Amino acid sequence: MGGAINIHIMKLFYTFMRIICLALTMICCFCLNSRAEEAIAVDSCARFEILGERLCDFGNISNNTGCVSSSFRLKSVGNVPLIIVSSTTSCPCTVATYDKDIIEPGDSVEIKMTYHIQSHLGGFLQSVLLKTNTKPEDYVWFYMKGCVVKGTREEDNGTD
């Protein structure tokens, strides 16, 4: 009778060990699979490259100018399209425009930033914030700066 109990205990022990091995195998497979998904997710990210400068310095400009504009370029360098989700400017006197918000890999987009001078005199620093679908940073900033100076009467009349 003692031998039958020992055999029964050994069968339970082996069954228990099989369950443990199966559980460990499942955990390992899950971990490997999730790491593979992370690697795929990282490789499948949208990415961008800034072509040129992020800042345009106009120096001194006349208040008779009306507005000044500068263009910036973003290139999609990831494996999936770059998406411009939204744009925000630092002030209502600044406008940002772009012709497409979905940029295929290898393509680029021009972002035109326009500052309406109106009657502002003195230094300015205007910005545009583009929110994108990139990770880990999902935004990009562009800037324009300068100093608005009072124009002369000749500029007002359009003569030299």
Image (cartoon, helix red, strand yellow):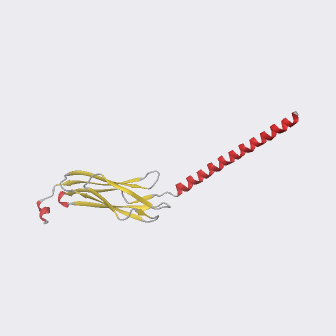
Task: Give the image quarter of residue 95.
Answer: bottom left
Residue 150 in picture, x, y percent from top left: 16, 55
Q: Residue at x 43, y 66 (%)?
A: 107
Please name the residue shown 13% across and 59% down the image.
152
Q: In the rendered view of the protein, which quadrant contains the N terminus? A: top right
Whole-percent x, y for residue 45 in the image: 49, 57
Q: Nearer the viewer, residue 38 or 54?
A: 38
Q: Can the viewer see residue 160? A: no
The total of numbered circles placed on residues is 0
Is 35 positioned to the left or the right of 74 in the image?
right
Left or right of residue 14, residue 110 in this image: left
Q: Foreground residue, 10 or 2?
A: 2
Q: Is residue 151 visible from the viewing direction of this image?
A: yes
Give percent across and percent down for residue 105.
47, 64
Taking the view exactly as shown, the residue that stands out farthest to the top is 2
Q: Is residue 20 left or right of residue 59?
A: right
The residue shown at (20%, 61%) is: 65
**117 left or right of 41 in image:** left
Where's residue 135, x and y in %?
Answer: 47, 53
Quadrant holding the C terminus: bottom left
Which of the 4 image quadrants contains residue 61? bottom left
Q: Quadrant of residue 118?
A: bottom left
